[in-house]
Image (cartoon, rainbow, N blue to C red):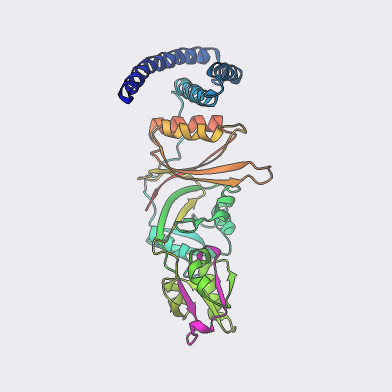
Amino acid sequence: MELSEIRARINQVDGQLLPLFLERMALSKEVAALKREEGRPVTDAARERQILAGVSERAGAELEEYARLFYGEILELSRAYQVQLIRSERDFPLPPAETQGFPHAAKVACQGVEGAYSQAAADRVFRFADIRYVNTFDDVFEAVEKGDVRFGVLPIENSAHGSVTKVYDLMRTHRFSIVRAVKLHIRHHLLAKKGTDLSGVRVILSHEQAIGQCSRFLRELKDVQVRVCANTAMAAREVALSGEDGLAAISSEACASQYGLSILKSHIQNTDNNYTRFIVIEKTPHLYAGANRLSLLFSLPDKAGSLSRALARFAAAGLSLTKLESRPDEGSNFHYVFYADLEADVTEPSVRRLLADLNDELPLFVFLGAYQEV
């Protein structure tokens, strides 16, 4: 047959498939009504295995895998439809709405010292931030949990160097709510005491993220040791206070002024398109006006295809995932927890139903917050 004839035949087959699909979904609706009436679970794993085994046997060796995938998707859609019908009256509980709006002033915990990028992020979010500096990211979470401050600011990812994995790992062990996010354009500079020449630099201090973001510049230097520091502002302060010769820091222009240092080399980051995203956390969940993003933490059932099925649920709800991060589940053998960011309005009934479904179906599900990025 000619290509046009084959395509015409495909159109005929497609025309037959859609009515059959609609008929099958109508039957799924009847099944959902019976299951709701009798209190039966939506998933019947034994029946699904039986169906897929029969499909494999009838499809033949060449197309067996494709047939199983095709029918697997049909079963997934049928299951999702039944869940929606059975649970249509249920909603995921929303955080209380904050009628006063997002505060302009607040006590805020930031990791580091004066001049830290977290401080700059806090200053972008709040008109006046009464900042309490702490030593570690863990201390930020704890300050919020204990009520020492109302908010905490934490870096979560960089456009050039990826995720801040320490923060993601701490999310697993702390209870908090994300209520804002902010992106900062990060420009790194090499700072040293006045009178120091670039050729005389022997040791460079900075945070591991900044070191990674300036890796090309650092590779060009000869006989220079790089030391990891807890924070870029801490690195600048250490250079200013140290009596060691040949010491420099990768830090910000603000830190040069703050600690009386000279800029030996400006804009040493690998790319000018260098942005770091920060989250603002609060102990008590609140829903502030303008929230159009969600963050979730979840684990998956230990069976093949779990991730693809979970992603299909987001796609079926018309939701766009903007980030999916996996981290090892501490204490388990090659099991992972996932962190997802998505663009969604949590007040939409369809979004709330999906969240309620995932909360019931997944082994671990934590709603991290609904917020606006500024």
Number of disc labels = 0
Query: Which residue is more in the foreground, 2 or 205?
Result: 2
Where residue 242 sits, quadrant-wise, is bottom right
Q: Is residue 279 visible?
A: yes
Please state the horizontal and vertical placement of residue 195, each as a whole percent of the image: 48, 87
Name the quadrant of the N terminus.
top left
Instruction: Identify the residue at image location x=44%, y=79%.
Output: 263
Query: Which residue is more in the foreground, 124 or 101?
Result: 124
Where residue 234 sits, quadrant-wise, is bottom right
Please state the horizontal and vertical placement of residue 220, each as a whole percent of the image: 50, 73
Image: 195 above or below 42: below
Query: Which residue is more in the foreground, 349 or 239?
Result: 239
Q: Is residue 126 visible?
A: no
Is residue 235 left or right of 159 when viewed as pictured? right
Is residue 338 left or right of 320 when viewed as pictured? right
Image: 234 above or below 325: below
Is residue 201 one of those drawn in magenta?
yes
Please state the horizontal and vertical placement of residue 302, each as a whole percent of the image: 62, 33
Magenta part of the protein: which range? 189-210
Query: Which residue is more in the foreground, 239 or 64?
Result: 64
Single out the residue that lies furthest toward the front.
1
Where residue 120 sits, quadrant-wise, is bottom left
Is residue 143 one of those drawn in magenta?
no
Single out the residue that lies furthest toward the bottom.
195
Please state the horizontal and vertical placement of residue 324, each as a whole percent of the image: 49, 44
